[in-house]
Image: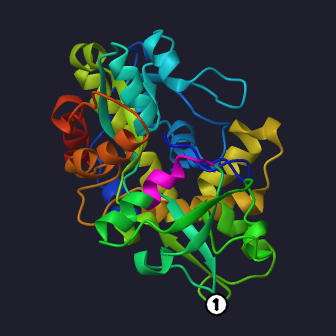
Amino acid sequence: MTHIPSLSRRSFIALGSAAVAGLAAPRFSFGQSLTPVTTALGWIPNAEYAGLWVAIENGYFAEEGIDIQYSPGGPNAPGVLVQLAAGQADYAGGDWVPLFEAINRGNDFVVLGAAFPQSPAALMSMAKNPVTTPEQLVGKKILSQLPADKNTIDFVLEKAGLPKDFEIVPTGFSPEPLLAGDGDAYMAFATNQPITFEQMGLVEGKDFFVTLFSDLGYNVPAGPIVADRAYVAENRDLVVGYLRALARGWLENGKDPSLGAKLAVEKFGADFGLSLEQTTRQSELEMPLITAPDAPGPFWFDATLVDTNCAPVAAAAGIENIPSAADIVDLGPLEEALKSL
């Protein structure tokens, strides 16, 4: 899944309780052996994976005949796509540029969905100097951790027919330099850095604004869920079951976002000293982003966005031979999983 660690780096509406309540009887027969399935996580076990923790805790994977396992990420962990290519994982979260690079190196990967069909990538700005539209970006200083963020701003301005007149100012992973006036806007994730301001007593919509990049014209599904094409072909029923269990976990978390947060803090991420207050808030902020407007359920996204939005920004970053969505996106297993909910 796409990666949004609490206050450490930038990285990812439930359909309602009736969807989960109406599930059919378990598809797994008692006495049948479980099949091990491993997911490579891009970061430590925090609220970014709240739905996964709920699905594990509630036995949803076991009901699908899956013995779910995961490899946690972190600063010293191998890349998730490296693990996938090496056969050390069956699924991996990721980002589009590394995925394109991995495919160009000969890996036959396929995208089965997106952890956050509505990307949490956002701009934070202060109420006294709002940057909430493409027009307001012109001439501004943008605080950013990544030089490549320039390509995203370029895309927004070009799409709006505006001059590419702005300055990228290097900064760290906390939005406090924005409060200090070091820049006019801060490249953030809507599920992460705004919590810092909230904990300082600032109120979103009054003291500061959080504007999703999708509202600025750059709509990109975040955290593509990736697997090897051959694995999907050989294990389709298992793949459908995996996606169904994961979707159930997120839908259940949507009823009470503190569920996944508590599991992250007290069980799955207990060794990382996570804050329950912050983790719960992150879980709350994530829920509106796991399902795109008018989508049939979690993880579903408009595949054409890969060609129209992801590819141009990746090309500007120097990526060549970018595959088309038709060649790397397969939402068939997800469609089957969601129809069964």
Q: Position of residue 117 (x, y in %)?
A: 36, 53
Magenta residues: mostly which secondary structure?
helix
Front position in the image: 61 or 129: 129
Task: Name the residue rendered at 73%, 56% in the picture.
Answer: 171
Total marks placed: 1
Where on the picture, by quarter, is residue 24?
A: top left
Residue 218 sits inside the magenta stretch? no
The kind of secondary structure element at disc 1 is: loop
Q: Which residue extends farthest top?
A: 86
Q: Position of residue 123 (x, y in %)?
A: 55, 68
Q: Position of residue 78 (x, y in %)?
A: 62, 20
Residue that badge 1 annotates: 206
Figure check: 165 above or below 332: below
Residue extent of the magenta highlight = 146-153
Question: Can residue 244 be seen from the camera position used here?
Answer: no
Front position in the image: 48 or 125: 125
Task: Name the residue rendered at 72%, 24% in the picture.
Answer: 76
Amino acid type shown at disc 1: Lys
Where on the picture, by quarter, is residue 129?
A: bottom right
Classify residue 337 as left or right of residue 31. Answer: left
Classify residue 158 as left or right of residue 45. Answer: left
Question: Can residue 232 be seen from the camera position used here?
Answer: yes
Classify residue 271 as left or right of residue 120. Answer: right
Task: Name the residue rendered at 52%, 41% in the picture.
Answer: 52
